[in-house]
Amino acid sequence: MRVSYKYSLIFAALVILGLAGYFGFGGKFGKSASINEQIAQIVRTSRAEQKTVPITVSANGYVTAINTVDVRPQIQNVVQQVHVREGQDVKANQLLFTLDARTDNSGVDKARAQLATDKAMLVDAEMALKRNQELLAQKFVSQAVVDSAQNKVNSLLSVVVADQAVVQSSSIALSFNKINASISGRIGAISVHPGSLAQPSGVPMVTISQLDPIAVSFSLPEKELQSIRASYPDGNAPVAVQLSPTQQLVGKLIFIDNTADTQSGTIRMKAQFENDKRVMWPGTYVNISLVSRTLNDAVVIPAQSIVTGPTNKFVYLVNQDETVTMQPLVVVETTSGQAVVTGLKVGSRVVIEGMQNLRPGASIKEAKTKPANPAKEVAI
């Protein structure tokens, strides 16, 4: 009995202490929680602005020569001399190779000799015709003799014309033994050497690539085509290439393919750039950017202020009493860290940092320091 009585006293004491603690401190705990709920969240804000916004599209492109020529001989012959070295810059009409021209030189000499012979025979025939015409006037010869002399002259005239054609043809064949550059540019690897047999159907003797100006080929989504054509009716859209963080080249659009790629949904384009300093090289990859269109009087906010919810995108709009509400909006374009939106008024104040701690109706307080690494967009 004494043991049960002892435990009853202990239990009663614990109950009394518990009730005292609840009624003594419960109100304070509730008040403390209420105060915590009223603490303002530290955020950074920005105001919606009205701007003219250029919409820039970017793509990866590869550098290609404007013109590339594979140098091949027009006749089969042995290489006698190479006048250039690999990797050399050459000018148009500069001598590259000389072939063995002995056979063709002989052909030209033979054709010229035959022409000289036939010209001499023509002179004799013309003199004979003249004498026979004089004798016919004196009736010492018949008309048939004169006609025969005239026919011989006509025949030799044709022979001389044919001889002249042979001389010209032989001279052309001789000229094929000197191979000149058809364009200015830089030559690549040389595949022949003195003594090599060069053939028209063989491997190119060398390839010449024009490096200045130079081109960049790239593809853009086909949806951008109409915007580009509308913004640049003459087709000379400025295209920028970012070679390094501090080096940019600006060229112009020179080509839009006549057909879009149905599988990728893109269309191929080409831009031309001045390249006198050889900062771009064929076959290398570069990043290009092109302003496809411009949005006038657009409402613009920092892209990092946009929150992606389960069903839509919104921003936290700051009210006059420094509380926030969720404002749904539509993002038209995002470029260079700025978002063009609809559904928001110019001058509206939106939260750009600290959105993860906010709920509708929450109080906010503007941060005094700049963010170290602001996010571009928040998703929940």
Image: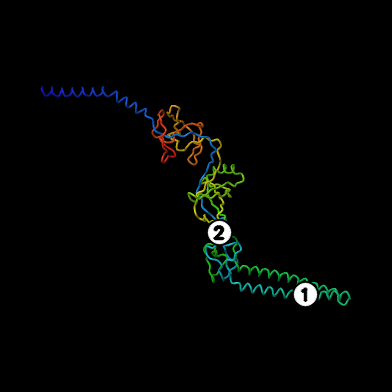
Residue 295 relative to residue 41: left or right: right
Viewer-side residue, 72 vs 183: 183
Q: Real-space Cα distance between discs 1 and 2?
A: 54 Å
Farthest-out residue, left: 2
Q: Is residue 105 left or right of residue 366?
A: right
Picture disc at residue 29: none
Question: Image check: 157 left or right of 349?
Answer: right
Q: Amino acid at mark 1?
A: Val
**Residue 185 drawn above or below residue 170:** above
Q: Is residue 92 left or right of residue 241?
A: right
Residue tagged by mark 2? 209
Res 310 quadrant in image? top left
Comparing 130 with 57, the one in front is 57
Per the image, the residue denoted by label 1 is 123
Q: Amino acid at mark 2?
A: Ser
**Could you tell me if residue 79 is visible in this image?**
no
Q: Secondary structure at mark 1?
A: helix
Of marks 1 and 2, the one in the foreground: 2
Number of numbered tags placed on the structure image: 2
Across and down, in percent, residue 305 comes to 45, 36
Above-or-below relation of 242 to 15: below
| Residue 178 visible in rendering | yes
**Residue at far bottom of view:** 140
Q: Residue furthest front?
A: 368
